[in-house]
Image (cartoon, rainbow, N blue to C red):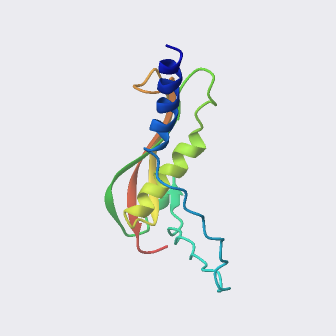
Amino acid sequence: MRVVPLCLLALSLTGCSLLHKPYKPVEPFKPAAQTEPVRAKPAPRPAPVKLYTDTNDLLSKPFRDLGEVYGEDCQVSRQSSPPNINTARKRMQIRAANMKANAVLLHQCEIVSNSQGCYRQAVCQGSALKVTGQ
């Protein structure tokens, strides 16, 4: 009777080892030949976009309106850093640069409370312009 549990124990220990693949030695690491490091070119920066806050500055300059642009900065929760109007304004200028504009006429910037997804939010709105006589 003592032989049966010992046989079962021996079979269970050897049975699991039959499922594993046999040991294969790992080849040592061979260093790659020395080559010149590849340097990625930095992403091209968009052209700077001038910010106009007064329409009188545009009276003597010919321009074309490319459409409305906006920028935003979100404060997700009460513990997050507060929204920044300068960041929202900068994001608006980046969106205008993506539209190939070289100027933005700022309409308004404001801090909005309890907007969807944000505790507080800074929002700037303006018009993207292509000014030809700068």
Along the horizontal axis of the image, is 107 left or right of 31? left
Query: What is the x, y in percent for residue 6?
Result: 53, 23
In percent of the image, x 32 and y 60: which residue is there?
65
Query: What is the x, y in percent for residue 126?
Result: 41, 48
Q: Nearer the viewer, residue 68 or 37?
A: 37
State whether residue 77 is above or below residue 55: above
Along the horizontal axis of the image, is 102 left or right of 41? left
In percent of the image, x 65 and y 85: which residue is there?
33
Query: What is the x, y in percent for residue 105?
Result: 44, 53
Q: Nearer the viewer, residue 134 or 15?
A: 15
In percent of the image, x 60 and y 37: which residue is there?
84
Along the horizontal axis of the image, is 95 left or right of 30? left
Along the horizontal axis of the image, is 84 left or right of 69? right
Q: Is residue 68 visible?
A: yes
State whether residue 60 is above or below residue 95: below
State whether residue 72 is above or below residue 34: above
In percent of the image, x 41 and y 74: which residue is there?
132
Q: Is residue 53 visible?
A: no
Quarter of the figure with residue 32: bottom right
Q: Nearer the viewer, residue 124 or 73?
A: 73
State whether residue 36 is above or below residue 59: below
